[in-house]
Image (cartoon, coloured by chain):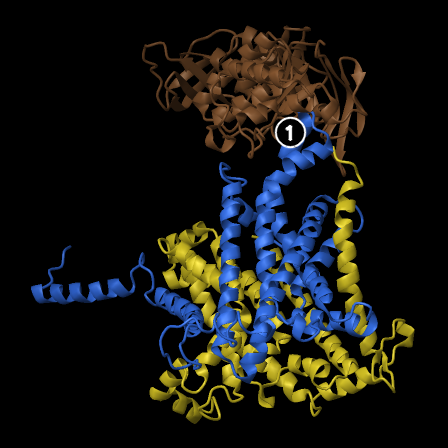
């Protein structure tokens, strides 16, 4: 069983509201697939439909080619790690993990060995007699994983499993989960709102908004080549600026005008509209001495420097009126910019991307 | 610019401000509040303690203390144990309470789960129907049941059976309200997890939901028992006379006529039984929720407890 | 994951029970109130069909409940008793609930247990305790007499003679307050406890004195609690008859509940008793309706914040 999941024209309506508004996704087996988006984008609803807890209003869900329309959740070869773990409070770890096996009428002897195997997989050997209430969040999370994985499902669904943990533990578990997925070799469908998490762990990401999929691609592509404003803004920080299209030269050869300044956009292709947006990542913007001339350079003034420890973040106001965020890695030498310093902002053409749509970007904080 | 106050001025200022500070202390509490509260507690509990004390009086008086004695509890024909009337009232009370628990608990638990999850037509009105007995004055309920059993459907005339039926009728709502609180604090997550792991709905119900509801069921058993034992109006209206009399009825009749220490004694026994039941229920509740944290603990259930 | 028919089937036994043993008897009261009396056996004949309703008895009862009728005194007395008792309960209960919820930190658990204790002591036992204390020679009676309070009460017109158990309204009110106040304090405490401390801190931060903060923040926010608790005890108090019976048992302190009880256990005329019960129920339903309306108004106010 490869663990292949197909969502075809999937729609879910609650009353008048469409939580999921027509999505098509294909997840071939053994992939770490993430669904990323803000709350309310429909990712959790989609996950619950795959698990069987919600019935689709329209569309189909295929698991390894079989339509799941009439299959109740307890008969699907899919297991879930819930956001709140949902470990049975009145049972200890052993009974929790063995629960599914007992439903399958596995022999007592096999149950014992498989439970031990699963606990070893998540590094919790020895805690069989403990009750969930006596364990830390990280331990509970691992029990939830073991409980699901012991049944050897074809697909594992994870609903924001790391949300309740502190930052350090989260980072540690991200690495462990990724390693686990590769070790076990099944499909993980992972739901999260944390874009850094998705970028770190996934083989592919589906960025969702308002019940629709904005883009499905590998992490690098989603980050470097966002197709819509939403994706550009949701992944990492992006500097979005309004621009007017001057010349269209196909992919990578667009010339735009920002304020009075003309820039070459070396990525992306402009759409039909004359008004569009350009985007550049903060770490690609370069600051040069005031008065430097050359292509793609706009004069500006440092409005606010922010010290981040591993980097310096500078908010620079361009002569065109836009504010651009610049990120300079802390390489040991002093970064000499202070508030009020005049600078020249250089946005290399190969890092500047023009977007095909103006999309619905979330409101940026000032 | 600094002002120089004379030494004496400074002294009186200090004394005055200190006094004002004590009275108007922004962080202190008004002194009369704890006084009122503790006075209230004394006023609330002490009269009953005195009544219990006099049940151990060595004489027939309820106002003059003549020393300690258990004569009103057992040993002679006027004592609770010796007097058949008092004796049978005690057993009748316990009988009614036990029957009430046995019938009302399953009905109430099923109704609680059903009402919490039912989404169809009739769910709203059924919920309203369940709440109604909680706000109906006892005399209205007593009168209605009396008319039904005493005059209309006299096949069940006023009797122990009628009393049991009456008790169950007002008890069901209490069970529902108590179990519902626990149900809300549990949520659907555990049953969904069970289904996800391969349990059919029947298994999810039996292995997950019911065990998790057990603490609330125990609490409702204790409370139903306690309320039933102390019920007066319904038992009185549906009583068949001597054999059906419960302890509250005995207390009522003798308190008006001429209370004796044996009345105090039997009332004290009831207080004792009720308190034991409630404490036992509470302790069992704690035992069964041991090892749960946050949602699932009693604070979680009490917070979810709402009509 | 659950079959669609499951939850309604779970509810079925309970609902059937309540319909048969709660709704039907309620209708029986109406049927008897609007029915007739068998002339020979003197038993009530309920009229099940509204078209057969005989308003004769109801008419007579309404007549007697109106000013000038034989029940009028009891009606007025009941209203007074409930009003005064409720006021006293709030006067005593609110500070206690306030103290326990806001200020009693180390003693909170103990106080809560003491608060809940009266719930588990039979109501009649608590009344019995006062009968003991107030009967001639009892502790309370002796103290009140010796300190001159009894004499003072007579002089002030609160009681007619120094025997507190001789059919005195003041004693009945005392008993009602004693009996019902626990049922008020607990919901009041719950409502006060639920008030977010940060509201008060904000008020103090903005310059309000403790008293002002109480007046402008705590009191309005506890309004629903006050209303809820008041309804919770007023409703049963209107139907109370055993309290006057036990603590006074004199015609000078009868409440409307006593009238109803009389027609069932005194000189049985179930039809009349049923009719009075119907009137009482309608009155209480109106009160309940007002409460639900008031709560909705209050929560609408909170929503607009």
- Residue at 37% x, 73% y is B68
Mark 1 belongs to chain: B
In the image, B41 versus B226, the foreground residue is: B226
Chain A tint in image:
brown
Q: Which residue is mark 1?
A: B193
Work out which residue is located at the far right of the displayed protein and give it.
C51
Task: From the rendered image, report the letter of the chain displayed in yellow.
Answer: C
Chain B tint in image:
blue
In the image, C232 versus A261, the foreground residue is: C232
Q: Quadrant of residue B15?
A: bottom left
Q: How many marks?
A: 1
Residue C9 visible, this orientation: yes
Q: Quadrant of residue A316?
A: top left
Q: Is residue C50 above or below residue B169?
A: below
Position in image of residue C86 (x %, y %): 54, 73
Q: Quadrant of the N terminus of chain C?
A: top right
Position in image of residue C71 (x %, y %): 69, 87
Residue C89 visible, this orientation: no
């Amino acid at each position: 069983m490869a663990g292949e999941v197909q969502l075809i024209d999937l729609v879910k309506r609650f009353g008048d509201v469409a939580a999921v508004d027509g999505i098509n996704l294909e997840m071939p087996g053994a992939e770490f697939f993430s669904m990323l988006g803000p709350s309310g984008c429909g990712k959790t609803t989609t996950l619950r439909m795959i698990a069987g807890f919600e019935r689709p209003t329209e569309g189909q869900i295929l698991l390894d080619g079989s339509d799941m329309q009439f299959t109740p959740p307890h008969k699907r070869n899919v297991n879930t790690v819930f956001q709140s773990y949902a470990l049975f409070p009145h049972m200890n770890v052993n009974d929790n993990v063995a629960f599914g096996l007992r439903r399958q009428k596995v022999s007592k002897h096999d149950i014992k060995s498989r439970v031990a195997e699963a606990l070893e997989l998540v590094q919790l050997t020895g805690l069989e007699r403990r009750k969930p209430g006596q364990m830390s969040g990280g331990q509970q999370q691992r029990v939830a994983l073991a409980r699901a994985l012991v049944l050897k499902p074809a697909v594992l669904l994870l609903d924001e499993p790391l949300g309740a943990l502190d930052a350090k533990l989260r980072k540690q578990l991200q690495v462990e989960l990724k390693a686990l997925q590769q070790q076990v070799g099944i499909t993980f469908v992972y739901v999260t709102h944390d874009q850094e998490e998705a970028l770190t762990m996934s083989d592919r990401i589906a960025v969702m908004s308002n019940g629709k999929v904005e883009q499905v691609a590998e992490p690098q592509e989603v980050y470097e080549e966002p197709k819509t404003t939403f994706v550009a803004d949701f992944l990492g920080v992006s500097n979005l600026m309004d621009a007017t299209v001057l010349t269209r030269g196909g992919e990578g050869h667009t010339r735009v005008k920002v304020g009075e300044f003309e820039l070459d956009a070396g990525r992306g292709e402009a759409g039909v509209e004359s008004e569009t947006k350009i985007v550049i990542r903060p770490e690609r913007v370069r600051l040069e001495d005031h008065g430097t001339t050359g292509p793609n350079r706009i004069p500006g003034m440092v409005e606010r420097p922010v010290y981040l420890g591993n980097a310096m973040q500078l908010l620079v106001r361009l002569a065109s009126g836009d504010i651009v965020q610049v990120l300079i890695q802390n390489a040991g030498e002093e970064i000499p910019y202070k508030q009020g310093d005049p600078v020249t902002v250089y946005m290399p053409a190969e890092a500047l991307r023009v977007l095909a749509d103006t999309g619905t970007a979330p409101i940026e904080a000032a | 610019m600094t002002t120089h106050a004379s030494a004496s001025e400074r002294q009186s200022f200090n004394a005055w401000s200190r006094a004002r500070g004590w009275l108007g202390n922004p962080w202190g509490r008004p002194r009369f509040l704890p006084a009122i509260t503790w006075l209230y507690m004394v006023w609330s509990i002490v009269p009953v303690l005195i009544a219990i004390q006099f049940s151990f009086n060595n004489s027939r008086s309820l106002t003059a203390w003549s020393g300690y004695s258990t004569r009103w509890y057992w040993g002679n024909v006027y004592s609770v144990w010796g007097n058949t009337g008092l004796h049978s009232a005690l057993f009748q009370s316990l009988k009614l309470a036990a029957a009430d628990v046995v019938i009302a608990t399953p009905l109430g638990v099923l109704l609680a789960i059903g009402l919490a999850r039912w989404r169809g037509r009739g769910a709203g009105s059924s919920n309203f129907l369940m709440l109604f007995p909680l706000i109906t004055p006892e005399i209205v309920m007593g009168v209605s049941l009396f008319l039904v059993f005493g005059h209309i459907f006299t096949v069940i005339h006023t009797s122990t059976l009628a009393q049991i039926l009456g008790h169950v009728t007002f008890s069901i709502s209490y069970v529902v309200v108590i179990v519902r609180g626990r149900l809300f604090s549990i949520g659907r997550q555990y049953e969904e997890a069970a289904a996800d792991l391969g349990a059919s709905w029947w298994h999810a119900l039996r292995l997950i939901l019911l065990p998790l509801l057990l603490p609330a069921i125990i609490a409702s058993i204790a409370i139903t028992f306690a309320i039933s034992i102390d019920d007066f109006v319904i038992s009185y209206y549906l009583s068949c006379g001597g054999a059906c009399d419960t302890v509250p009825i005995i207390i009522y009749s003798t308190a008006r006529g001429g209370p004796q220490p044996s009345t105090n004694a039997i009332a004290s026994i009831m207080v004792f039984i009720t308190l034991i039941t409630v404490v036992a229920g509470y302790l069992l509740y704690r035992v069964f929720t041991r090892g749960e944290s946050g949602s699932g603990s009693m604070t979680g259930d009490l917070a979810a407890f709402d009509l | 994951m659950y079959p669609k028919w499951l939850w309604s089937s779970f509810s079925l036994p309970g609902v059937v029970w309540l319909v048969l043993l709660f709704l039907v008897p309620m209708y029986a009261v109406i049927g008897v109130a609007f029915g007739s009396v068998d002339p020979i056996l003197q038993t009530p004949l309920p009229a099940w069909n509204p078209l057969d309703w005989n308003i004769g008895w109801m008419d007579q009862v309404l007549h007697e409940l109106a000013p000038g009728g034989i029940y009028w005194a009891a009606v007025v007395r009941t209203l007074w008793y409930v009003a005064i008792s409720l006021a006293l309960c709030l006067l005593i209960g609110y500070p206690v609930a306030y103290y326990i919820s806001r200020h009693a930190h180390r003693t909170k658990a103990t106080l809560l247990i003491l608060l809940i204790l009266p719930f588990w002591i039979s109501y009649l036992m608590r009344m019995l305790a006062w009968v003991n204390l107030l009967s001639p020679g009892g502790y309370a009676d002796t103290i009140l007499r010796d300190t001159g309070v009894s004499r003072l009460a007579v002089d002030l017109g609160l009681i007619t003679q120094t025997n507190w158990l001789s059919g005195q309204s003041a004693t009945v009110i005392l008993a009602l307050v004693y009996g019902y106040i626990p049922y008020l304090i607990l919901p009041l405490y719950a409502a006060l406890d639920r008030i977010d401390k940060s509201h008060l801190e904000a008020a103090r931060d903005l310059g309000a004195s403790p008293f002002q903060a109480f007046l402008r923040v705590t009191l309005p926010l506890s309004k629903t609690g006050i209303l809820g608790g008041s309804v919770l005890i007023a409703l049963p108090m209107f139907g109370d008859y055993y309290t006057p019976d036990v603590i006074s048992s004199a015609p000078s302190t009868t409440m409307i509940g006593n009238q109803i009880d009389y027609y069932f256990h005194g000189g049985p005329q179930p039809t009349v008793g049923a009719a009075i019960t119907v009137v009482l129920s309608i009155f209480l339903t109106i009160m309940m309706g007002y409460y639900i309306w008031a709560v909705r108004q209050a929560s609408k106010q909170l929503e607009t914040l």
